Image (tube, rainbow, N blue to C red):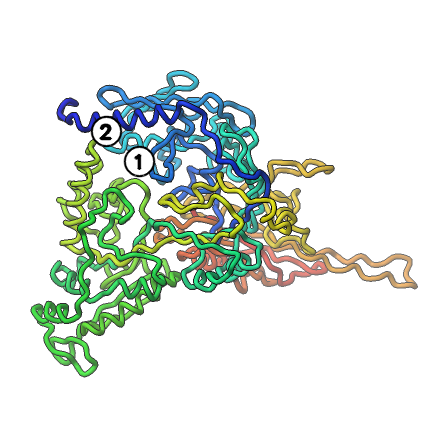
Amino acid sequence: MKRFSHFGARFFLVMAAALAIVIAGCSKREKYPLGEAGGMLTIGSLNEPASLNPLLLSFTAPSDIQEKLFLSLHRFDKSMNIVPELAESWKFSEDFREVTYHLRQDVKWSDGQPVTAEDVKYTFDLMTDPQVNYSRAGYLQFVETVEVINAYAVRFKFNRLYSDELFDTGIIVLPKHALEKQASLASGEFDASPVTDGPYQVEQWIRGDRLVLTANPGFYKGQPALEQIVIRFFGDEASLAAALQNGEVDMTEDLSPQSILKLQGDPNLVAIDYPGRSYAYLGWNLKSPLFASAQLRKAFAMAIDPSEIIQSVLLGKGQAAAGPILPSSWAYDENLKPMPYDPEIVKSALSDLGWKSLNRDGFLAKNPRQALQINLLLAQGQPVLEASAAIIQKQMKMAGVKVNVQVADARTFIQRIRTGAYDVMMFSWKNDLKVDPTAVWHSKVENKGIFNLLEYSNPQVDSLIDQGLGTLSRRKAKDIWVKFQQVVAQEQPATYLFVPNAVAMVYKGVKGAQSDARGPLASLDEWWIPSAERRGAQVAAVTPPAPETPAPVTTPEPETPASTPVTNKPAPAAPKPVPVKPAPAPKPVNPQDILVAETPTPAATPAPVAAAPEPVAEIPPTDPEPTNIGKAEYPDLARKAGITGRVFVKVIVGADGKVKSAEVLRGIGGGCDEAAMEAAKKSNFKPGTVNGQPAERSFTIPYSFR
């Protein structure tokens, strides 16, 4: 290994400047921008989290909402600089093998306990525990140990020098005293009603309906302006768009370009564009003789014009992609351009490979019976990709190539990729803020290229990835990442299509919402709404009216009514409700975590007969009792795409105890809905009764995927 002095003076100057910025940033206590206090913001979402525990998040980027509940050691500001948060300062050792964080001493958990270095070490130990299966454990692979120096100082020691030491150690911190009381990480009250230290804390969580956050009065920067944030969960985009337009929702990020276009004329709404972090691409079957040649893969790439997709499908809200590193990244190669679109050049290139003549349908062929055609495979439930595939099909025809678009359910999609039963597949991948293409493009599966669906293998690419991650100088790292992008572009194992912009629709009365690379919700705790702009009808919406019948999906606590929300606060002038405990997290092969009976509407008691001394009481109906619940398999595609959440399946149980039908009440897509429904159909029950006799009754089963 090279001696430390060989890294050069330039690196020391960069690091010294960075440390000076940190120290300057800690010289005085940061305060919130001035804004009128009070009011409530309602956010509409199509995705309900399965848990509020950050360690149970998927591989995709951390939830912005969870980042408002828990502090990290440091964070990114709007200019994407690392700035202090829970840590007020940090210092590297002379050899950069250690970094010591000094914590703020004025930060407390929502139960009044101080946040200490013990919490940092405890969280790190959980993150690196194989039993926890933390999705970002790989980011900590070069951290050897974490040592508590004193109550407010903690030291990270590295087993190698690399450029992202500071990035990787800025972990989110959880309360040791609260979590160590639980039997497991995924069970207990913390899952749904956590002890927090961020600008907001959880007031109540009504699963399937809403999550209510209230401003933390003890937050170290002072209480944020918005008194309450309500996240409402919707089952479909149309309902969400309607709620946004009629004023029930103030903000959402979950609308398609088509829905946004319909709302852009609304004078009460403002669109906020910000850089997206995902890219869509075509992945060629590298094991197929047809696509073994990089020359042919390039030819196919030249038959595609991403600009038409961007204009027609994304409505101009995006940009062409040229490689696996996004244009918004510091490591992006500005000189790298997408393959040029030229159908004639494509025909010429294909002619050199033997595809010379056109058949009567206008497709290239080697002989009248062998037309050039390829099967384009994608997973269902992705309207943007499906619309893009239709355009690609049309463009390929202009080059003489016949494309058969095949849309499969998630399970079939991933099985066909695993077995090589495809020509080209279309997929979308979301990058994290850290530059690390290991998971998708490294050939070593063990803890590295676990999402390398194409099974792409290139020793030079592997070496460049390892070098890029292990380089201390960002300038040198940039050169390495540029070379990495160029090699991938030359080999063309995938043809990159587009990077869609992300668009948030926000009520015009909201102040402080801004656009930057982090996304608008990163600054959520700095938003405010002037009293004159507040929509009073929302206040009553925080506590929904009691339904006429009990909610169909209840909690597993039989003594707790179904309408009782998960809450940190007891209801006023009433006995303290029994806390609703979330069900334990299932293993991937057994995703159901709770069984929920649908509470029936009691039949009306018949009026007493005048001649009878007493009315005859009707025997109350009973619910089906499960004897065996079908186990749902977590679809590989959903797991790889980071799709998590609960799927609620309503089954009709016949008088014989067998499931007659099943329907998804609330789903999360990615093949999870189908997996849950098929599993539910395999369940068996002791039948429910009406008037003491076996009868057809309904039952709701929630399946948890994470």
**Lower sequence index among marks 1 and 2:** 2
Check disc 2 and give the amino acid type. Val
460 or 333: which is nearer to us?
333
Q: CA distance from mark 1 to mark 2?
A: 23 Å
Quarter of the picture containing the N terminus is top left
The answer to whether 337 appears left or right of 512 in the picture is left
Element carrying mark 2: helix
- What's the residue at 34%, 23% (across, down)? 90
Residue 496 horizontal/vertical position (percent): 24, 57
Q: Is residue 118 visible?
A: no
424 or 473: which is nearer to us?
473
Residue 415 horizontal/vertical position (percent): 30, 58
In front of the other: label 1 or label 2? 2
Element carrying mark 1: helix
Q: Where 156 falls versus 327 (above or below)?
A: above
366 or 253: which is nearer to us?
253
Asked where in the image residue 166 lies, by quadrant, the reply is: top left
- What's the residue at 26%, 52% (across, down)? 453
- Residue 139: mark: 1
Q: Which residue is mark 2?
A: 14
- What's the residue at 67%, 51% (across, down)? 545
Residue 460 horizontal/vertical position (percent): 13, 44
